[in-house]
Structure formats: C-alpha cells, structure tokens
Image: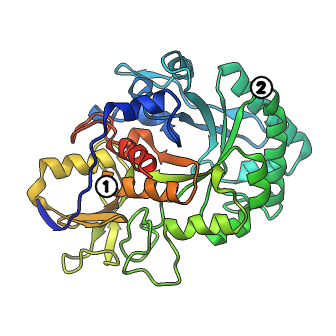
Amino acid sequence: MKVLFVVSVLLCVVSSLAKSVKDGSSSGVVFCYYGSWANERPGVGRFGVSDLPLDLCTHIVYSFLGLNATGDLTYPTEQTLEGKSNAVADLIALKQSNSNLKILSAIGGWDEGSANFSTVVNNDTLRATFVSNLYNYIDTNGFDGLDLDWEYPAQRGGIESDKEMFVTLVKELKSAFEPKGYILTSAVAVTQTHIDLSYDVPALTQYLDYLNLMLYDFHGTWDTETGVNAPLYPQLTDDASLNLNGNHSVHVWLENGANASKLLMGLGGYGKSFTLTSLNNTSTGAPFTAAGAAGPYTEEEGILAYYEICLDQKNNSSEWSITEVTGNYVYANKDLLWVGYDNPSTIYVKAQYAKTMGLRGIMYWAVDLDDFQGLCGDKFPLITQGIAGYNSV
C-alpha cells in the first residue's frame, strides 16, 4: 500500500472500556443511529438488530418514522432477511441484555424533507394529532424516547414560521413525554446559515435533552471539486470564508446559545466519493467528473461505508494511495476513485475534541456503516475509538 503521509495512532482498547459503557459508567453519551433498511444490503453488508453493539452504545436510534400531511405516521417495513431482523419488537428486546440501554425512534431524515412537517406544525389541530401519534407510538412499542430529524425547518419545502413552530412542537412533545420520563432529542444542521433559518437555539436547548450535531456532509458531489466528508478543521484547499468544518460549527452552536452539556458531536461512519478527472491532482480541491461508483454493499453512488473502504484497501493494498491529515481527516484514491473519510485515528481525536469542548458525548451516523463484521480487524473500530478518545481526556 502506497502511503503519502500516514500517522496512525490506534490505541489498544482494554476490556474495561466496553464494560464501562455497558454498566452506564462511561463519562459520555454514545448515540448510535441505526438505519432500519440496513438488513436489505447484500452479503457481508447485511445488518440486523442482532448486530447492534450493546456494550458500546448508550443510546440506539431506530431510523426513520415518516409522516403525512394529516399528522399521521408512516412506518419502516419490518422484515427478516437471511436471518437479519429489523423488527421493533426484536430491537426493544435488546434491553433485556443491557438494562442501561436507551432505545429511541427517529422521525424524518433527508428523504422525508420538510413539506409535511411544515404543514402539520403550522396547524394547531394537525400538530396536536401529530404529538398524540408520536407519544402513542413511543409508549406502545416500549421506546425510551424520540429523535426529531426534521431536515430542515423553514427550508426544503418549509415556510418561515417553521422556525417558531418547531419550538412549539418541541415544547408540546416535552410536556407529553415528561410524565413518563421519555427522552426528546433532535438531529440538527450545523452551519450559521442553517441555524439562522431553522433554529431558535436557546429555546431548543431549554426543552431538548440532546442536540445531535450533524458534523458531516460538509462536502460532496454538489461541490465543484473534491472534499472530505467531515473535516474537524479547514482543508488546506478550502477558501477561508467557507467555514465548512466541525470546529467552526461547534463554536457556532455555542455562540448562538447552546449549552455544551446538551450537544453531541456527530461522527460519520462513511466517506464521500468522487470520480477524478485525472490523476494529475488527487488531493482535496481536485476536479472530478461524477460521483464515485457505488459500493458493493451500500449500493449508492458518491458514498462508501467505512467497511467498504477498509476492506477494499485491505484486499487491494497496492492500488490505493492514502493521505492522513493527522487529527483531521483522511483521503485516498484508487485510480480515479477518490474518497474522503475518517479512520479510527481521526475519530479518536474528534472524540477527544468533543470532550475538551465540554460536549456531552458523541453520535454516529450510522452504526451499520462501521466495520461491524470485523472485516478489517476488530469489530466496530470507529465507535470503539470514539469512546476511547472521549474518555481519554
């Protein structure tokens, strides 16, 4: 394997680390989002409830519920494929193995968009129906709480009043949830522009238990040049005015009135991929012609799961050129395929950063994108190193 600049700092994780998380004595929260569709992936990519790491995650977030314009809910298809179940009952049953584990359901996501949310929250009757439906779903199925993943109020089909009415929705859900102690969280965008349009930060901080900062997707094929998925600090090729990095976004949330003790630092278990124009420039800021080819298991152009990246690098080591910018990000190319991502070393440092900044913990999108099979070594290296990094400070 040709390595341009690699500094690998993979710490040994002793058995007491996993035990501390399972026993609830870890100093940080570890949110693990789980895509209910992951059991539809082929071969070694197929991920079911039985693959979830109960000794690592303090919270598991089942994604995604949807909604329609009347405030009624839509539900993921529950099925067992080749022995891998995504059923809610099987998920909730995991708490029998770890009494400290909290399991939430998430509603929304990128594909859901904003239009139905906007229609419902801006109508008092529809919003009341929505709140009642959400409470009943959480209560009936044995969940411990709800994650609101509206992407994003007052954007993508929403209207200006969404910003205010999102706070109203949160307040009403909090009131409904409080008697039984259900958790209420939200996954939120991270740039100043998004915050200005979508969020009353002090109000949301008051009523939500956690705000999950989506500190990834800073770059992608919507750009005009290659860029890594989740830089902690600016890429060398970024214009100084872009401010597309995790450090800047954490400070933006804090400066807008968020309480650090309610913020979770989002970490990506995937990379953004591109098809380079040529091999004359293989760095960040390089020209590209299209999204990178779909991975064999996630099967989506422009995105590769961490296990798809590390497995191909393991099996075709001589074909990859890898550059690690220490404590920040990694990018690599195999011929014209280019991908920017995080490895265990950069995840470790980002989790250290979260602890140093006083954030309450870390969040992963998504648990099913880490190396859950141990194809490249130990199982769940990103989640494990994130916990180690957070608890090292």
In the visual, does 95 lie left or right of 179? left
In the visual, does 74 lie left or right of 332? right
Marks 1 & 2, CB-CB < 8 Å contact: no
Q: Give the SS element for disc 1.
A: helix
Alpha carbon separation for disc pair 1 and 2: 40 Å
Q: Position of residue 202 (x, y in %)?
A: 77, 59
Q: Which mark is residue 57?
A: none
- Residue extending farthest to the left is 318
Residue at x 38% of width, y 54% of height = 347
Quarter of the image where one finds residue 140: top right
Q: Position of residue 236 (x, y in %)?
A: 37, 79
Please determine whether, in this image, residue 104 is positioned above or below residue 302.
above
- Residue extending farthest to the front is 393
Of residues 243 and 384, the one nearer the viewer is: 384
Q: Give the SS element for disc 2.
A: helix
From the image, tell me which residue sits under label 2: 180
Q: Give amino acid for label 1.
A: Ser
